[in-house]
Image: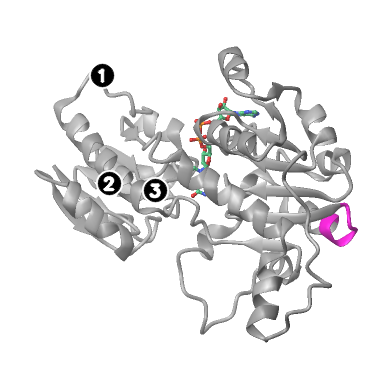
Amino acid sequence: MKALVFSIKSFEKIYLQKANRIHDLIFTESALSLDTVEKAKGYDAVILFTSDIADRNTLIHLKKCGVKYITTRSVGFDHIDIEAAKSLGINVANVPEYSPYAVAEHAVLLMLALNRKLALANELFRKNNFLLDSLVGTELHSKTIGVLGTGKIGTTMIKILNGFGCKILAHDINESKALELKLNFRYCDLNTLLKESDIITIHVPLNSHTKYLITDTKIKMMKRGVVIINTSRGGIINTTHLIQSIENGHIGAVGLDVYDNEKVLFFRDFSQSTINDLNFIKLKSFPCVMMTAHQAFLTETALRNIAETTISNLDNFEINSKEFKNKIV
Ligand code: NAD
């Protein structure tokens, strides 16, 4: 089939080309939006990324362009209005799993880097300042870690954190007793997790139930000095409340790979231009905040798996496979 790949990045193009055998793939660096949707005219499918916006209006135009299929190169599909796609008869698929290790390892990386003040240590080292006075850290061992969401990434987190000797609490709307028996952790309600954890790591999807799940009310329940790690989606935390709680000292440190307003910032080079997002500027200014620009997924294994599953999604759309498990609608 003929498919247009929106928001293509040089690092992933080669993997898609290698995985593809029979489809006619055309690449554009443009992100999908109302302004760019016309590019999809004459294509059977579009292949999206998290930075694309497939809201109702854009989907209506996609349909008019003749697009019948959407496959997203991501686990999350919060950038696609699934209900609208369903009503328009556009099929949507995702990559439900490409490497939970990539994201979980990145979340652990943020935890360790914050606990051991790695950014400051590197900065001082480069300046030949080898004094240790400002670098006293904390250990993961014996800490209580709250894992929010025990899906593929949350489960991988639990396995890794078990190795560090952490006490692990977890919360999920779908508890798996089998998992609890197999791994060393305990399920609890959300409030208990918030109250008892030294570090909270977020692994739930963004949807209408989890949008701003973490507000100032929830933050006030957390221990003073709590560390929050979010590698899931920026919209799960109310950024304004997060900033206030860092300023008033309630939150000790924050590690973020995602940001609420990231669609207009991430995956672009702003080194020669100005950023006007005041919340973003503020967050970046705190020494206790470490941020990466949505790179938790970015490993060779993940890129290969994303490409292979994306191409297999096109194959399955084409043959209208009944066993197509990645199909959302
Ligand atoms: P998953 O579907 O395997 O697991 C999500 C878990 O969250 C499920 O167990 C589900 O029951 C639970 N959940 C859903 N709503 C909940 C709620 N309101 N309260 C408690 N639990 C809830 O997904 P996954 O593969 O583990 O990925 C999790 C998220 O990570 C994705 O949705 C995506 O947003 C994000 N992600 C980020 C990156 C990155 O590069 N930063 C890469 C991949 C995925």
> Which residues make up the magenta segment?
245-250
Q: Is residue 236 above or below residue 93?
A: below
Q: Give neighbour class at mark 3: few <14, some 14-19, many 20+ (Cα, 10 Å).
A: many
Displayed quadrant of residue 324: top left
The mark closer to the camera, 2 or 1, is 2
Q: CA distance from mark 1 to mark 3?
A: 29 Å
Dot 2 or dot 1: first in sequence order is 2
Of residues 156 and 7, which is closer to you in this image?
Answer: 156
Q: What's the residue at 18%, 54% (across, down)?
A: 17
Find residue 275 and report its horizontal and vertical position in percent.
60, 75
The mark closer to the camera, 3 or 2, is 2
Mark sitting on residue 58: 3
Dot 3 or dot 2: first in sequence order is 3
**Name of the residue lying farthest toward the left:** 22
Dot 1 or dot 3: first in sequence order is 3
Mark 3 CB in 8 Å range of ligand 1?
no
Inspect the magenta stretch and tell me whether residue 246 lies in it.
Answer: yes
Q: What's the residue at 77%, 40% (across, down)?
A: 143
Specify whether 259 is left or right of 315: right
Q: Amino acid at mark 2?
A: Ala
Mark 1 CB in 8 Å range of ligand 1?
no
Which residue lies under the disc numbered 2? 307
Secondary structure at numbered mark 1:
loop
Q: Give neighbour class at mark 2: few <14, some 14-19, many 20+ (Cα, 10 Å).
A: many
Find residue 216 and report its horizontal and vertical position in percent.
83, 45
Which residue lies under the disc numbered 1? 323
Q: Amino acid at mark 1?
A: Glu
Find residue 186 and report its horizontal and vertical position in percent.
71, 22
Specify whether 166 is left or right of 9: right
Q: What's the residue at 72%, 55% (across, down)?
A: 254
